[in-house]
Image: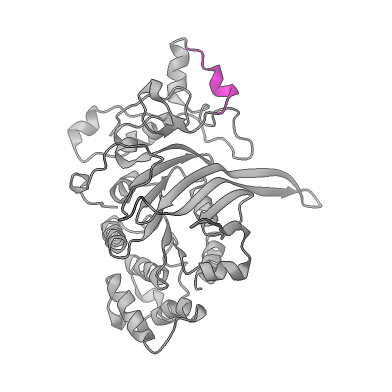
Amino acid sequence: MTATEDTAAGAADATTGDTPADDTTDETPTPEDAAAPVDRSDGDGPEVVLEARHLVKNFPIHGGVLQRVHAYVQAVSDVSFTLTRGETLGLVGESGCGKSTTGRMLLNLIRPTSGEVLFRGQDITELSAKEMRKLRQELQIVFQDPYASLNPRMTVEATLSEPLRIHDKWDSDGSDTIRELLERVGLANEHKRRYPHEFSGGQRQRIGIARALALRPSVIVLDEPVSALDVSIQAGVVNLLTDLQEEMNLSYVFIAHDLSVVRHISDRVAVMYLGKIVELGNRIQVYESSGHPYTQALLSAVPLPDPKRERERERIILTGDVPSPVDPPSGCRFRTRCWHKQDLDVAGVDTSVCEEEEPLLQIRPSGGVDHPVACHFAEQRTVV
């Protein structure tokens, strides 16, 4: 499916600048079990609004004269996590690791091959199109490309009013609602009569965010919302998302490959590689005491603002290409590029288990890791 097709599908169903703030000013979470979501509720515990259970998505590959299926792309393989009210879960990884596919399955824009997506206890993968449309009020998405996700023939007012009209929420106060939405995302009421091409990239993304907010959802999937923006604009959009979350108690799934942005906005972080989650923890666990060799390699590539520390730290270079999701390696999917396995082989350690047995996503106390990691030889390591 192309980006344009994704956007059209999302808009039809739903309607239905990288300069993050200094991390030293963030509220640093204390180390805890990563499987336990952030508790921002006033009741007995955090309310789980969205849960993914063993999600799998295989895309068929057709070939030959009769265009028969001869193989499958294993885009997502057995992904599970929870999202609580008011929480931000960051989903990071290389391009092609299955982040966006996972995000679209959470909204039922893509039907999973197997697995469940529970919204407040209800499996939305079993819902009909009519039943799903009613639920779109609670589940929204902001796409990566702000220009492709907006209809160039529709004014801002028409774009923002469309979901309200489709869901029978447009009334005599509709103009006031449009004005409030624009003010909420930092735009003026006079902008409502303009077309998308009359705005900058950052302004267009703010319009996309306003459209997602129109129906007052509980969950918003943010599919790389700042990667297409200039660095000077990214921080403004990220700060806007943070302010809106505090104001409306929103839950975010924040998909990105920029680890600096993810660290700034996320409460918990899930790291994906070749369709699987390989590490899951809160922000301090993943960034300051990561346990998976892949996460450590990603963090070593994050530039540091201190030139001295940048020169002195060790950079982890991954060798080889990413394996094909059509035929992933046996056992651990990362083993063909794993620098840690290579070091253990040189030291004479038997690593045959990496080829024979797929590692489970679990806490590895033997390596000093206090959060779930999918690695047989996980070891805590501070990289950033």
Residue 241: x, y in percent? 31, 60
Question: Is residue 199 depicted above or below 278 in this figure?
Answer: below
Residue 9: x, y in percent? 56, 66
Question: Is residue 84 depicted above or below 342 in this figure?
Answer: below
Question: In the image as oriented, which residue stretches furthest toward the front?
Answer: 44
Tell me where the magenta segment starts and ends, as one range: 349-358
Closest to the observer, 186 or 19: 186
Taking the magenta stretch, the answer to whether it contains residue 293 is no
Residue 227: x, y in percent? 38, 54
Question: In the image as oriented, which residue stretches furthest toward the bottom?
Answer: 172
Residue at (33, 33) in percent of width and height = 300
Closest to the observer, 378 or 316: 378
Residue 97 at least partly seen = no
Residue at (60, 57) in percent of width and height = 125
Tally the numbered discs: 0
User: On the rendered structure, is 86 left or right of 139?
Assistant: left
Residue 85: x, y in percent? 38, 56
Viewport quadrant of the N terminus: bottom right
User: On the rendered structure, is 160 left or right of 69?
Assistant: left
Residue at (34, 41) in percent of width and height = 282
Residue 192, located in which quarter of the rendered image? bottom left
Taking the magenta stretch, the answer to whether it contains residue 356 is yes
Closest to the observer, 3 or 87: 87
Viewport quadrant of the C terminus: top left
Residue 103 at least partly seen = yes
Question: In the image as oriented, which residue stretches furthest toward the right?
Answer: 66
Residue 292, located in which quarter of the rendered image? top left
Color theme of the render: one colour
